[in-house]
Image (cartoon, grey):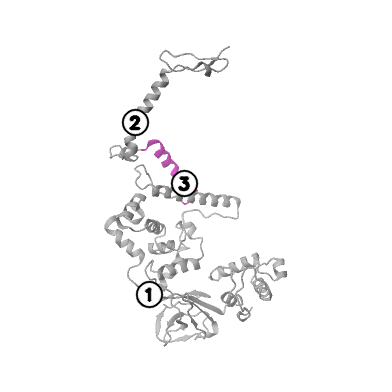
């Protein structure tokens, strides 16, 4: 399928000759489409699933919409690719999209650069896309471009340029920011505000009660403080990845559990990181730092990777997922009572069933022996509100009167069960009921 054949984006629910051509293209790529969808020339569920899978494999946004970018790559030679795309957004210094900017892509050599034939002008969201072929490289023997992207205003003045991407892939995402970036990022401001308060404590050591105190002292949103703590803990697990990168990913709504985070596509992780950078959530990232998601997926994880094709693997993965859910509920519960004096191991997390089982001896010790000796001589805490504490003498008096009245009153005859007799105790009260023969 040639890209020129796609006059419009194809999506679920559409039908016609263009969808039939899409089916043929997907079949050539090895995808199986339901017979009824092919007969009706209909964009149904199997077509949608095939398009999403194709987009994921080619680092496109997996939205199931077959657009010009997907069509351009679908027609390419899989063994000897000669079609490429660079896509991205252009932002102003304050993080807002920059509309109407001309974007050009170049193949960079040692002392020269060759512009590609196609250019683009950014849309309302600052988006652009440039298609190019292998025969546009300045040196025809190269299989991949050494790519650089530049943005220009209407007068032809260069506004921004990317770093060189050597041996660019079939799809590259390059975002540009025009002008000087603003001051400290959100992450850097939070870290700076907390530094004099936490002194020598590390972020990953902060407890729910610490977060409650810091929230009241600095007025920083508790949600952001929790994400800061989670990012520090993930950095401890994967110390080759900066804490700020984890914070940026979490601020885009991605999972804070490492095993769940790694289940996302590299393209999604990279795009999320770029958005966090461009929005000023984390510091502006150079092109080399945008390869962090590629390093992240190679991080060894302590949680076991189950083979979900087997029965044991499916149950094991489900057990680990349930364990992480319980761990999250436990952390949220502890965070709801930051001032509780009885909170023990509040920062403990479980990422797998194995870790939970290993913690059981400690849990038994807590259940049987708490409070521990080191808490015997510490100052206690008064429980309950002042009104409730003032009401306790009245409650105690009332309970005593009720108890003494019960002991003084004899049993009523009409409450006696058939075939049973009651024996009065010497000092009042009731004895157990015995059957009469």
Residue at x-position 50% and y-position 68% = 267
Task: Examine the rendered structure and indicate whether residue 287 appears above or below residue 250.
Answer: below
Does residue 61 appear anywhere in the picture? yes
- Residue 243, percent from left and from top: 38, 62
- The image quadrant that residue 228 belongs to is bottom left
- Dot 1: what SS? loop
> Could you say which disc has been placed on residue 136 in the image?
none
Q: Which mark is residue 394?
A: 2
Q: Label 2, label 1: how many angstroms apart (C-alpha)? A: 66 Å
Front disc: 3 or 1: 1
Q: Earlier in the sequence, mark 3 or mark 1?
A: 1
Q: Which mark is residue 356?
A: 3
Rate crowding at label 1 as few (under 14), some (14 to 19) or many (20 or more) other CA atoms within 10 Å. some
Closer-to-camera residue (373/227): 227
Q: Which residues are magenta?
A: 351-370
User: In the figure, 225 relative to 99: above or below?
Assistant: above
Q: Is 21 left, or right, of 345 in this rendering?
A: right
Contact flag, marks 2 and 3 (Cβ < 8 Å): no
- Assess whether mark 1 and mark 3 are in contact (beta carbons under 8 angstroms): no
Q: Quadrant of the C terminus?
A: top right
Q: Residue drawn 34% across and 41% down?
A: 385
Q: Which mark is residue 93?
A: 1
Q: Is residue 249 inside the magenta stretch? A: no
Which numbered mark, 2 or 3, is in the foreground of this view?
2
The answer for how far apart the CA atoms under marks 3 and 1 are is 47 Å
What secondary structure is marked by label 2?
helix
> Rounded to the nearest whole Å, what is the CA distance between mark 2 and mark 3?
45 Å
Out of 89 and 77, give the one closest to the viewer. Answer: 89
Main SS of the magenta segment?
Answer: helix
């Amino acid at each position: 399928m040639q890209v020129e054949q796609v006059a419009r984006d194809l999506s679920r629910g559409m039908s016609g000759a263009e969808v039939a051509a899409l089916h043929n293209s997907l079949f050539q790529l090895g995808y199986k489409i339901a017979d009824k969808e092919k007969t009706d020339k209909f964009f149904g569920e199997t077509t949608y699933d095939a398009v999403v899978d194709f987009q994921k494999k080619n680092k496109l946004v997996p939205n199931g919409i077959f657009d010009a970018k997907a069509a351009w790559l679908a027609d390419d030679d899989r063994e000897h690719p000669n079609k490429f795309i660079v896509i991205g957004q252009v932002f102003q210094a304050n993080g807002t999209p920059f509309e109407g900017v001309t974007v050009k892509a170049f193949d960079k050599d040692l002392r020269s650069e060759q512009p590609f034939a196609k250019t683009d002008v950014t849309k309302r969201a600052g988006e652009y896309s440039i298609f190019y072929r292998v025969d546009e490289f300045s040196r025809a023997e190269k299989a991949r471009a050494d790519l650089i992207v530049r943005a220009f205003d209407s007068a032809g003045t260069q506004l921004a340029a990317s770093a060189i991407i050597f041996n660019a892939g079939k799809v590259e995402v390059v975002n540009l920011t025009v002008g000087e970036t603003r001051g400290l990022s959100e992450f850097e401001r939070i870290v700076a505000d907390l530094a004099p308060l936490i002194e020598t404590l590390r972020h990953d050591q902060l407890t729910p009660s610490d977060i409650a105190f810091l929230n009241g002292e600095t007025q920083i949103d508790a949600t952001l403080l929790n994400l800061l703590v989670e990012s520090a803990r993930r950095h401890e697990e994967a110390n080759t990845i900066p804490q700020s990168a984890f914070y940026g990913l979490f601020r885009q709504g991605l999972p804070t559990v490492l095993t769940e985070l790694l289940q996302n596509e590299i393209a999604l992780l990279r795009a999320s990181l770029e958005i966090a950078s461009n929005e000023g959530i984390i510091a502006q990232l150079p092109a080399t730092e945008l390869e962090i998601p590629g390093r992240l997926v190679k991080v060894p994880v302590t949680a076991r990777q189950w083979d979900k094709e087997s029965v044991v693997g499916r149950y094991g993965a489900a057990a680990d997922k349930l364990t992480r859910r319980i761990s999250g509920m436990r952390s949220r519960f502890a965070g709801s009572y930051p001032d509780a004096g009885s909170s023990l191991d509040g920062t403990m997390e479980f990422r797998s069933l194995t870790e939970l089982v290993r913690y059981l001896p400690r849990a038994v010790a807590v259940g049987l022996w708490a409070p521990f000796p080191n808490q015997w001589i510490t100052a206690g805490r008064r429980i309950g509100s002042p009104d409730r504490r003032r009401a306790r003498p009245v409650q105690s008096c009332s309970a005593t009167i009720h108890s003494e009245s019960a002991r003084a009153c004899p049993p009523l005859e009409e409450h006696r069960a058939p075939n049973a007799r009651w024996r009065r105790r010497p000092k009042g009260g009731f004895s157990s009921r015995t059957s009469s023969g």
